[in-house]
Image (cartoon, helix red, strand yellow):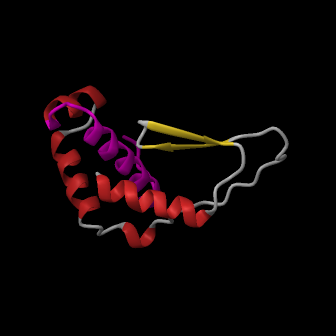
Amino acid sequence: MARIQNEDKIIYWRKMVRKFKVSSLSVSEFSKKHGITPHKLTYWKTRLRDKKCTDKTKPFIEVKRKSQENSTVSLSINDVLTLNFSSPPSPEWISELISNVKKAS
């Protein structure tokens, strides 16, 4: 894997850890399937669980839309669930949803 900026690396590993959690694969099987080492997956699972790197990451990014006419907003959670909205939910609602998803996993 090419050298990645710290924040991009954290985003990448959060995605991989989420995919691993919803898979039914062992660490070894998942790692082989995705071309990563079992050691790195285990390291990042622990690092992200211990929240050592959350201070430097931003939970939300601003997205500007060109037009709001006839558009929908999609929110994907853990590559498992996608919610579609005809109008965007409030940031507070999204934050509460994310908190509840974290508690449930």
Q: Was residue 78 drawn as part of the magenta stretch in this picture?
A: no
Quarter in which the N terminus is drawn: top left
Residue 29 picture location, percent across and down: 17, 29
Q: Was residue 14 drawn as part of the magenta stretch in this picture?
A: yes
Residue occupying the point 46% across, 65% down: 57
Residue occupying the point 39% across, 59% down: 100
**Furthest residue in direction top, as rendered:** 33
Q: Is residue 34 left or right of residue 67?
A: left
**Residue 21 placement: quadrant:** top left
Residue 36 picture location, percent across and down: 26, 37
Q: Which residues are magenta?
A: 1-27
Q: Is residue 47 left or right of residue 12?
A: left
**Residue 55 placement: quadrant:** bottom left
Residue 30 picture location, percent across and down: 22, 32
**Furthest residue in direction bottom, as rendered:** 55
Residue 68 picture location, percent across and down: 82, 47
